[in-house]
Amino acid sequence: MKKLFRKIAVITLSIVVFGAVAVFVGSEYRLGKTYDIAVTDFHADSGLPIEEASRRGRSFMCVGCHRSAGNVLFTAPLVGTLVAPNISRIAPTYSDGELERLIRHGVKKDGTAALVMPSSTFAHLADDDVANIITWLRTLPQAPDAQPAASSFGPLGRIALALDHLPFEADHTPANLPELAHRPADTGRYLVANTCSHCHHLQTEAEVEGKVVPPLAVVSQAYSLADFTQLLRTGIGLGSRELGLMSEVARSDFSNFDASEITSIHAWLQTNPQDGRPVSH
Protein backbone atom coordinates (compact mmCIF):
# COMPACT_ATOMS: atom_id res chain seq x y z
CA MET A 1 0.00 0.00 0.00
CA LYS A 2 2.86 2.41 0.83
CA LYS A 3 4.38 1.73 -2.58
CA LEU A 4 1.04 2.53 -4.23
CA PHE A 5 0.70 5.83 -2.31
CA ARG A 6 4.29 6.68 -3.14
CA LYS A 7 3.67 5.95 -6.81
CA ILE A 8 0.52 8.10 -6.81
CA ALA A 9 2.41 10.92 -5.08
CA VAL A 10 5.22 10.75 -7.65
CA ILE A 11 2.75 10.77 -10.54
CA THR A 12 0.81 13.68 -9.01
CA LEU A 13 3.99 15.67 -8.40
CA SER A 14 5.15 14.97 -11.94
CA ILE A 15 1.85 16.24 -13.34
CA VAL A 16 2.05 19.39 -11.22
CA VAL A 17 5.66 20.05 -12.23
CA PHE A 18 4.92 19.36 -15.88
CA GLY A 19 1.89 21.68 -15.75
CA ALA A 20 3.89 24.43 -14.08
CA VAL A 21 6.66 24.15 -16.66
CA ALA A 22 4.13 24.15 -19.50
CA VAL A 23 2.43 27.27 -18.12
CA PHE A 24 5.76 29.06 -17.67
CA VAL A 25 6.98 28.14 -21.15
CA GLY A 26 3.63 29.10 -22.68
CA SER A 27 3.52 32.44 -20.87
CA GLU A 28 7.11 33.26 -21.86
CA TYR A 29 6.29 32.38 -25.45
CA ARG A 30 3.30 34.76 -25.37
CA LEU A 31 5.33 37.56 -23.82
CA GLY A 32 8.06 37.05 -26.42
CA LYS A 33 5.75 36.88 -29.44
CA THR A 34 6.84 39.39 -32.07
CA TYR A 35 4.82 41.21 -34.71
CA ASP A 36 5.88 41.74 -38.28
CA ILE A 37 4.97 45.41 -38.47
CA ALA A 38 7.59 47.55 -40.14
CA VAL A 39 8.92 50.77 -38.65
CA THR A 40 8.03 53.60 -41.00
CA ASP A 41 10.10 56.67 -41.80
CA PHE A 42 7.87 58.81 -39.59
CA HIS A 43 9.02 62.34 -38.80
CA ALA A 44 7.39 63.96 -35.77
CA ASP A 45 6.75 67.48 -37.02
CA SER A 46 3.16 68.66 -37.17
CA GLY A 47 4.19 72.15 -38.19
CA LEU A 48 2.95 73.64 -34.91
CA PRO A 49 5.05 75.57 -32.39
CA ILE A 50 6.44 73.13 -29.83
CA GLU A 51 4.25 74.58 -27.04
CA GLU A 52 1.04 74.01 -29.03
CA ALA A 53 2.14 70.59 -30.29
CA SER A 54 2.93 69.54 -26.72
CA ARG A 55 -0.41 70.84 -25.43
CA ARG A 56 -2.27 68.75 -27.98
CA GLY A 57 -0.05 65.75 -27.30
CA ARG A 58 -0.76 65.90 -23.56
CA SER A 59 -4.52 65.69 -24.14
CA PHE A 60 -4.40 62.09 -25.40
CA MET A 61 -4.44 60.45 -21.96
CA CYS A 62 -0.81 59.25 -21.75
CA VAL A 63 -0.30 60.80 -18.31
CA GLY A 64 -3.53 59.26 -17.02
CA CYS A 65 -1.88 55.84 -17.28
CA HIS A 66 1.87 56.46 -17.19
CA ARG A 67 1.99 59.40 -14.77
CA SER A 68 5.36 61.16 -14.67
CA ALA A 69 7.60 58.14 -14.03
CA GLY A 70 5.50 54.98 -14.44
CA ASN A 71 2.39 53.76 -12.67
CA VAL A 72 0.83 50.57 -11.32
CA LEU A 73 -2.38 49.97 -13.29
CA PHE A 74 -3.40 46.74 -11.60
CA THR A 75 -2.15 44.45 -8.86
CA ALA A 76 -3.64 41.35 -7.28
CA PRO A 77 -2.26 38.39 -5.30
CA LEU A 78 -1.38 35.38 -7.48
CA VAL A 79 -2.26 37.36 -10.63
CA GLY A 80 0.55 39.90 -10.74
CA THR A 81 1.27 43.57 -11.14
CA LEU A 82 0.69 45.46 -14.38
CA VAL A 83 2.84 48.57 -14.75
CA ALA A 84 2.59 51.39 -17.28
CA PRO A 85 6.29 52.10 -17.75
CA ASN A 86 8.19 55.34 -17.30
CA ILE A 87 7.77 57.07 -20.66
CA SER A 88 10.14 59.88 -19.70
CA ARG A 89 12.98 57.34 -19.66
CA ILE A 90 11.79 55.01 -22.45
CA ALA A 91 10.82 57.56 -25.13
CA PRO A 92 14.40 58.80 -25.70
CA THR A 93 15.47 55.24 -26.61
CA TYR A 94 12.92 55.10 -29.46
CA SER A 95 13.13 56.72 -32.89
CA ASP A 96 10.12 58.69 -34.16
CA GLY A 97 9.17 55.73 -36.36
CA GLU A 98 9.40 53.29 -33.45
CA LEU A 99 7.21 55.54 -31.31
CA GLU A 100 4.67 55.83 -34.12
CA ARG A 101 4.52 52.03 -34.33
CA LEU A 102 4.14 51.75 -30.55
CA ILE A 103 1.37 54.36 -30.44
CA ARG A 104 -0.61 53.11 -33.43
CA HIS A 105 0.10 49.38 -33.31
CA GLY A 106 1.08 48.60 -29.71
CA VAL A 107 4.39 47.10 -30.82
CA LYS A 108 7.48 47.85 -28.77
CA LYS A 109 11.03 48.49 -29.93
CA ASP A 110 11.91 44.78 -29.78
CA GLY A 111 8.85 43.77 -31.81
CA THR A 112 6.85 42.39 -28.88
CA ALA A 113 3.45 43.73 -27.88
CA ALA A 114 2.54 46.18 -25.14
CA LEU A 115 -0.13 45.13 -22.67
CA VAL A 116 -3.22 47.37 -22.34
CA MET A 117 -1.72 50.15 -24.52
CA PRO A 118 -4.86 51.54 -26.27
CA SER A 119 -3.45 51.30 -29.78
CA SER A 120 -6.71 50.09 -31.30
CA THR A 121 -7.96 53.61 -30.58
CA PHE A 122 -4.73 55.49 -31.31
CA ALA A 123 -4.49 53.67 -34.64
CA HIS A 124 -7.05 56.18 -35.95
CA LEU A 125 -5.10 59.30 -34.94
CA ALA A 126 -4.12 61.75 -37.65
CA ASP A 127 -0.43 61.92 -38.49
CA ASP A 128 -0.14 65.40 -37.02
CA ASP A 129 -1.53 64.27 -33.66
CA VAL A 130 0.85 61.29 -33.52
CA ALA A 131 3.58 63.84 -34.21
CA ASN A 132 2.22 66.06 -31.44
CA ILE A 133 2.37 63.20 -28.92
CA ILE A 134 5.94 62.40 -29.91
CA THR A 135 6.91 66.07 -29.77
CA TRP A 136 5.54 66.25 -26.23
CA LEU A 137 7.34 63.04 -25.23
CA ARG A 138 10.61 64.58 -26.41
CA THR A 139 10.12 67.48 -23.98
CA LEU A 140 9.78 65.30 -20.87
CA PRO A 141 12.61 65.54 -18.35
CA GLN A 142 13.84 62.05 -17.54
CA ALA A 143 12.81 60.90 -14.08
CA PRO A 144 13.85 57.83 -12.05
CA ASP A 145 11.44 54.94 -12.39
CA ALA A 146 8.61 54.79 -9.89
CA GLN A 147 8.54 51.43 -8.15
CA PRO A 148 7.71 48.78 -9.11
CA ALA A 149 9.20 49.66 -12.49
CA ALA A 150 8.07 46.64 -14.49
CA SER A 151 5.15 44.26 -14.76
CA SER A 152 5.35 40.87 -13.07
CA PHE A 153 3.10 37.83 -13.18
CA GLY A 154 2.00 35.36 -10.53
CA PRO A 155 0.75 31.84 -11.28
CA LEU A 156 -2.76 32.94 -12.27
CA GLY A 157 -1.33 35.68 -14.46
CA ARG A 158 1.00 33.16 -16.07
CA ILE A 159 -1.94 30.87 -16.82
CA ALA A 160 -3.84 33.78 -18.38
CA LEU A 161 -0.80 34.58 -20.53
CA ALA A 162 -0.37 30.98 -21.61
CA LEU A 163 -4.04 30.83 -22.59
CA ASP A 164 -3.75 34.20 -24.37
CA HIS A 165 -6.39 35.84 -22.19
CA LEU A 166 -4.60 39.12 -21.52
CA PRO A 167 -5.23 42.25 -23.64
CA PHE A 168 -2.37 42.74 -26.08
CA GLU A 169 -3.62 45.62 -28.22
CA ALA A 170 -1.37 44.64 -31.12
CA ASP A 171 -3.82 41.78 -31.72
CA HIS A 172 -6.75 44.18 -32.11
CA THR A 173 -5.30 47.04 -34.14
CA PRO A 174 -6.85 47.26 -37.62
CA ALA A 175 -4.54 45.96 -40.33
CA ASN A 176 -5.50 48.57 -42.93
CA LEU A 177 -5.66 52.00 -41.36
CA PRO A 178 -7.17 55.01 -43.11
CA GLU A 179 -4.60 57.58 -44.07
CA LEU A 180 -5.35 60.77 -42.18
CA ALA A 181 -2.69 63.44 -42.37
CA HIS A 182 -4.50 66.16 -40.42
CA ARG A 183 -7.30 66.54 -37.92
CA PRO A 184 -10.68 66.51 -39.67
CA ALA A 185 -13.01 69.48 -39.59
CA ASP A 186 -15.37 67.57 -37.26
CA THR A 187 -12.97 67.93 -34.33
CA GLY A 188 -15.50 66.93 -31.65
CA ARG A 189 -16.30 63.60 -33.24
CA TYR A 190 -12.61 62.91 -33.83
CA LEU A 191 -11.54 63.74 -30.28
CA VAL A 192 -14.30 61.61 -28.76
CA ALA A 193 -13.20 58.71 -30.95
CA ASN A 194 -9.58 59.03 -29.92
CA THR A 195 -9.88 59.90 -26.23
CA CYS A 196 -13.26 59.30 -24.58
CA SER A 197 -13.81 55.97 -26.34
CA HIS A 198 -10.87 54.48 -24.42
CA CYS A 199 -13.36 54.02 -21.58
CA HIS A 200 -16.86 55.00 -22.71
CA HIS A 201 -19.40 53.60 -25.13
CA LEU A 202 -21.85 56.11 -26.49
CA GLN A 203 -25.24 54.55 -25.71
CA THR A 204 -24.39 51.54 -23.54
CA GLU A 205 -22.56 51.05 -20.28
CA ALA A 206 -18.96 49.85 -20.27
CA GLU A 207 -16.71 48.42 -17.56
CA VAL A 208 -13.28 49.80 -16.68
CA GLU A 209 -11.16 48.48 -13.80
CA GLY A 210 -14.15 46.56 -12.51
CA LYS A 211 -16.39 49.64 -12.38
CA VAL A 212 -19.38 50.52 -14.54
CA VAL A 213 -18.79 53.48 -16.86
CA PRO A 214 -21.94 55.36 -17.97
CA PRO A 215 -22.89 55.79 -21.64
CA LEU A 216 -21.23 59.00 -22.73
CA ALA A 217 -23.82 60.31 -25.18
CA VAL A 218 -26.56 59.77 -22.59
CA VAL A 219 -24.92 61.29 -19.51
CA SER A 220 -23.56 64.26 -21.47
CA GLN A 221 -27.11 65.45 -22.20
CA ALA A 222 -27.31 66.69 -18.60
CA TYR A 223 -24.24 68.90 -18.99
CA SER A 224 -24.37 72.47 -20.20
CA LEU A 225 -21.26 73.71 -21.97
CA ALA A 226 -20.21 75.49 -18.74
CA ASP A 227 -20.68 72.30 -16.69
CA PHE A 228 -18.87 70.23 -19.30
CA THR A 229 -15.98 72.70 -19.38
CA GLN A 230 -15.71 72.52 -15.60
CA LEU A 231 -15.68 68.71 -15.76
CA LEU A 232 -12.85 68.57 -18.30
CA ARG A 233 -10.87 71.37 -16.68
CA THR A 234 -11.17 70.32 -13.04
CA GLY A 235 -12.60 66.81 -12.92
CA ILE A 236 -15.61 68.03 -10.94
CA GLY A 237 -18.93 66.67 -12.17
CA LEU A 238 -22.50 67.83 -11.67
CA GLY A 239 -23.36 68.35 -8.03
CA SER A 240 -19.70 69.12 -7.24
CA ARG A 241 -18.95 65.39 -7.38
CA GLU A 242 -15.61 63.64 -7.72
CA LEU A 243 -15.91 60.99 -10.43
CA GLY A 244 -13.03 58.66 -9.65
CA LEU A 245 -10.95 57.79 -12.71
CA MET A 246 -12.79 60.34 -14.84
CA SER A 247 -11.76 63.12 -12.46
CA GLU A 248 -8.14 61.94 -12.46
CA VAL A 249 -7.95 61.75 -16.25
CA ALA A 250 -9.67 65.12 -16.66
CA ARG A 251 -7.12 66.84 -14.44
CA SER A 252 -4.08 65.13 -15.93
CA ASP A 253 -5.07 65.01 -19.60
CA PHE A 254 -8.38 66.58 -20.64
CA SER A 255 -7.51 69.85 -18.90
CA ASN A 256 -5.16 70.36 -21.86
CA PHE A 257 -8.06 70.75 -24.30
CA ASP A 258 -8.56 74.34 -25.32
CA ALA A 259 -11.95 76.06 -25.33
CA SER A 260 -12.66 75.35 -29.00
CA GLU A 261 -11.92 71.64 -28.57
CA ILE A 262 -14.17 71.37 -25.51
CA THR A 263 -16.94 73.22 -27.34
CA SER A 264 -16.63 70.87 -30.34
CA ILE A 265 -16.71 67.74 -28.15
CA HIS A 266 -19.73 68.99 -26.23
CA ALA A 267 -21.59 70.02 -29.38
CA TRP A 268 -21.06 66.65 -31.04
CA LEU A 269 -22.17 64.71 -27.95
CA GLN A 270 -25.34 66.82 -27.80
CA THR A 271 -26.35 65.27 -31.15
CA ASN A 272 -26.84 62.04 -29.11
CA PRO A 273 -24.67 59.86 -31.40
CA GLN A 274 -25.25 56.13 -31.48
CA ASP A 275 -23.04 53.23 -30.43
CA GLY A 276 -20.50 51.95 -32.86
CA ARG A 277 -17.06 53.51 -32.85
CA PRO A 278 -17.30 57.11 -34.08
CA VAL A 279 -15.18 57.38 -37.19
CA SER A 280 -12.13 59.59 -37.07
CA HIS A 281 -12.46 61.13 -40.53
Image (cartoon, rainbow, N blue to C red):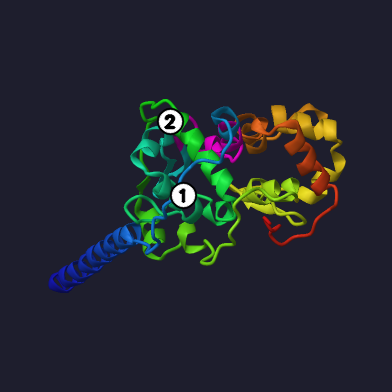
Q: Which residue is pictured at 72% across the width and 54% down the height?
A: 205
In the figure, is residue 212 to the left or right of 122?
right
In the figure, is residue 275 to the left or right of 17?
right
In the figure, is residue 135 to the left or right of 279?
left
Instruction: First in sequence, mark 2 or 1: give its number.
Output: 2
Identify the disc placed on residue 100.
Answer: 1
In the figure, is residue 40 to the left or right of 129?
left
| Rendered location of residue 8, percent (x, y) | 21, 71
Residue 109 vs 159, above or below: the answer is: above
Classify mark 2: helix, strand or loop.
loop
Question: Can residue 131 be seen at all in this image of the molecule?
Answer: yes
Quadrant holding the N terminus: bottom left
Is the C-beta separation of discs 2 and 1 under 8 Å? no
| 66 in magenta | yes
Return the residue found at the far left. 3
Label 2 to label 1: alpha-carbon separation: 20 Å
Q: Which residue is pictured at 86% across the width and 45% down the height?
A: 221
Quadrant holding the C terminus: bottom right
| Rendered location of residue 148, percent (x, y) | 37, 35
Out of 255 and 208, give the one closest to the viewer: 255
Say which amino acid is labelled 2: Ala
Residue 239 vs 85, above or below: the answer is: above
| Rendered location of residue 166, percent (x, y) | 46, 58
| Rendered location of residue 93, percent (x, y) | 33, 39
Return the residue found at the far front. 47
Number of residues whose C-alpha sits closer than 10 Å to that of mark 2, classed few (under 14), some (14–19) or many (20 or more): many
Q: In which quarter of the image is residue 258?
A: top right
Q: What's drawn in magenta, residue-wise?
A: 54-71
Q: Name the residue under label 2.
A: 69
Say which amino acid is labelled 1: Glu
Q: In which quarter of the image is residue 25?
A: bottom left
